[in-house]
């Protein structure tokens, strides 16, 4: 991956001291300022490349747009408090620590399951009030009961292994993790419709997204066993809070363990004050170990990214995952350069880009189609007014501009392997180009059906022109350039001479006015790479 320079980071919440230490040991200046209001954060953030938060700081679109951030790091799982769409549009990497609090969240889930089964918090409170009421707190064994786990990621897996130790049968649902994988953990996967009626206990471990909001509601509670107990240590809103109150009042739900709420802290106390609810103030990651791990992890992830080693925990920059090798860097430069050449051709003829098709060829480029597409678009959009494209935001920028993008990969013979072909359509006119990396240098092989005898090295000042081949063409162009004070440094001619073709000359500087070439050529474009 191309180096992303992070020189300054603001930590806006209480994060383990190791976070600051690791960043500073790697040459990054760190400022810690906690409990800032939104307007204070907006004023402060302008001076930083990176922002590290936990869950209290709401990183809204206003804050993102007021800054020049390159990365937002969330020391914990989930990014509910970060406007990821706004960050992506601005080209800012959003990163979290996906495994930092896994064990702590899983252990709290298990603690709530056990507390629900034996009424431990209620019994402890009764004792503190001077009571000795054994009958009131009659519980039930977990042994032999069925635990439904909705969401079988890291935390769901850890919960399953621990509750199996109590002799519970674990069943689950996850739209991503394959059933054969969860079977190896002892979790039988099934549809939600099959899961609800079987469970004595249900725990949710999904992200909060449109498809999971109100996952447990009046309708789903009605499908469950009467007296089912539920736990939510994931995100407030996955369980419909109003529906949960109704289920508790009717006895359809026998108890709930809640560490998270839609509003935190909750102003509506109907759940917190309910006798069959055990509630905590969002303690899932509140262990010394989790906080140390999350703080350390986010710092190490930022450092690894800056050093170009690897990218871990990025939620909006998957395109960067395969960009850490020298070969990938060369291909990215190739994509940007080919895109820039085609952009200069379309711009010189004052045509608006509407469609882009990118094709990668050969096994060596099989894993590069994604970032090659983005890099080509960066080259195409780099000179658009008000546009600052990078590999993270360029697909959304293209969509906003009404540009349709098609990408595909095809096998090829050895001669064509490692070639990237690009075709653009602008106002009905089509321009094509193909390029590859030769000797570590990006080169242009072809421009709109003109195959160059000598590949064009995509570096420096380049002048492309379309003209009819003639013995006098080069000398005429050289003479005209000389009158403008421009020297020819290289020359690439097309292999065929049967019709109007594209030529390329490397020049000492760009022409002040391309119209000077009009007497000699049909089209012309120039750029600096």
Image: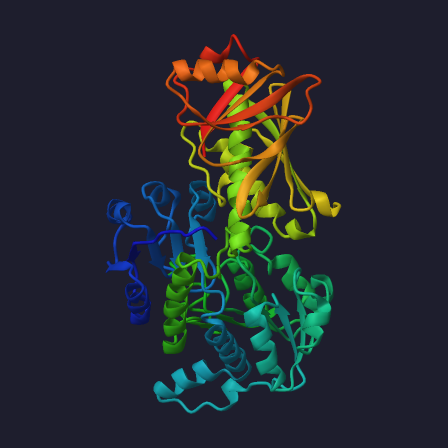
* Residue 209 position in % (x across, y down): 55, 53
* Residue 401 position in % (x across, y down): 52, 29
Residue 34 seen: no
Of 17 and 277, which appears nearest the observer? Answer: 17
Q: In the rendered view, how is the structure colored?
A: rainbow
* Residue 501 position in % (x across, y down): 63, 20
At a point 63% along the width and 16% down the height, the residue shown is: 469
Q: Quadrant of the C terminus?
A: top left
Image label count: 0
At a point 46% along the width and 65% down the height, the residue shown is: 271
In this rendering, is residue 420 above or below 511?
Answer: below
Residue 528 seen: yes
417 left or right of 384? right
The image quarter in which residue 198 lies = bottom right
96 left or right of 456? left
In this rendering, is residue 406 above or below 255?
Answer: above
At a point 54% along the width and 58% down the height, the residue shown is: 240
In this rendering, is residue 120 above or below 17?
Answer: below
183 left or right of 522? right
At a point 36% along the width and 41% down the height, the residue shown is: 65
Of 101 and 513, which appears nearest the observer? Answer: 513
* Residue 9 position in % (x across, y down): 30, 56
510 left or right of 12? right
């Amino acid at each position: 991956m191309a180096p992303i320079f992070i020189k300054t980071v603001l930590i806006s919440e209480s994060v383990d001291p190791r976070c600051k230490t690791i960043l500073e040991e790697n040459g990054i200046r760190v400022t810690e300022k906690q409990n800032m209001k939104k307007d204070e954060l907006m004023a402060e953030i302008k001076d930083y490349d990176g922002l590290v938060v936990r869950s209290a700081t709401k990183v809204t679109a206003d804050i993102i747009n007021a800054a020049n951030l390159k990365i937002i790091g969330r020391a914990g799982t989930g990014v509910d408090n970060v406007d990821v769409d706004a960050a992506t549009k601005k080209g800012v990497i959003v990163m979290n620590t996906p495994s930092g609090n896994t064990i702590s969240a899983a252990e709290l889930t298990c603690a709530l399951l056990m507390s629900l089964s034996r009424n431990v918090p209620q019994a402890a409170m009764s004792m503190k009030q001077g009571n000795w009421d054994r009958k009131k707190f009659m519980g039930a064994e977990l042994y032999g009961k069925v635990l439904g786990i909705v969401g079988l990621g890291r935390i769901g897996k850890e919960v399953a292994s621990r509750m199996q130790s109590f002799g519970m049968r674990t069943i689950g649902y996850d739209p991503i993790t394959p059933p054969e994988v969860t079977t190896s953990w002892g979790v039988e996967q099934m549809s939600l419709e099959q899961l609800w009626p079987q469970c004595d206990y249900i725990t949710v471990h999904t992200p909060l997204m449109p498809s999971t909001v109100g996952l447990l509601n009046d309708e789903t509670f009605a499908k469950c066993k009467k007296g089912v107990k539920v736990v939510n240590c994931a995100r407030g809103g996955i369980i419909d809070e109003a529906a949960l109150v109704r289920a508790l009042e009717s006895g359809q739900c026998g108890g709930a363990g809640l560490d998270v709420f839609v509003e935190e802290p909750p102003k509506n106390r109907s759940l917190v004050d309910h006798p069959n609810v055990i509630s905590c103030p969002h303690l899932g990651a509140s262990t010394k170990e989790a906080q140390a791990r999350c703080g350390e992890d986010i710092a190490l992830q930022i450092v690894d990214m800056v050093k170009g080693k690897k990218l871990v925990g990025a939620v909006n920059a998957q395109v960067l995952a395969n960009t850490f090798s020298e070969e990938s860097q060369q291909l990215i430069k190739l994509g940007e350069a080919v895109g820039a050449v085609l952009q200069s051709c379309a711009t010189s003829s004052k045509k608006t880009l509407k469609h882009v098709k990118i094709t990668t060829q050969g096994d060596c480029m099989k894993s590069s189609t994604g970032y090659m597409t983005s890099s080509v678009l960066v080259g195409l959009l780099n000179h658009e007014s008000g546009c600052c494209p990078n590999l993270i935001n360029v697909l959304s920028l293209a969509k906003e501009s009404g540009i349709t993008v098609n990408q595909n990969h095809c096998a090829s013979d050895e001669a064509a392997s490692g070639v990237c072909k690009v075709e653009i359509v602008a106002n009905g006119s089509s321009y094509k180009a193909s390029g590859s990396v030769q000797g570590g240098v990006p080169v242009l092989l072809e421009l709109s059906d003109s195959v160059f005898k000598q590949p064009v090295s995509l570096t420096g000042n380049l002048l492309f022109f379309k003209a009819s081949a003639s013995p006098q063409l080069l000398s005429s162009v050289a003479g005209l350039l000389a009158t403008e004070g421009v020297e020819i440094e290289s020359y690439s001619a097309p292999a065929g001479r049967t019709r109007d073709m594209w030529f390329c000359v490397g020049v000492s500087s760009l022409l002040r006015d391309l119209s000077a070439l009009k007497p000699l050529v049909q089209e012309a474009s120039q750029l600096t790479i």
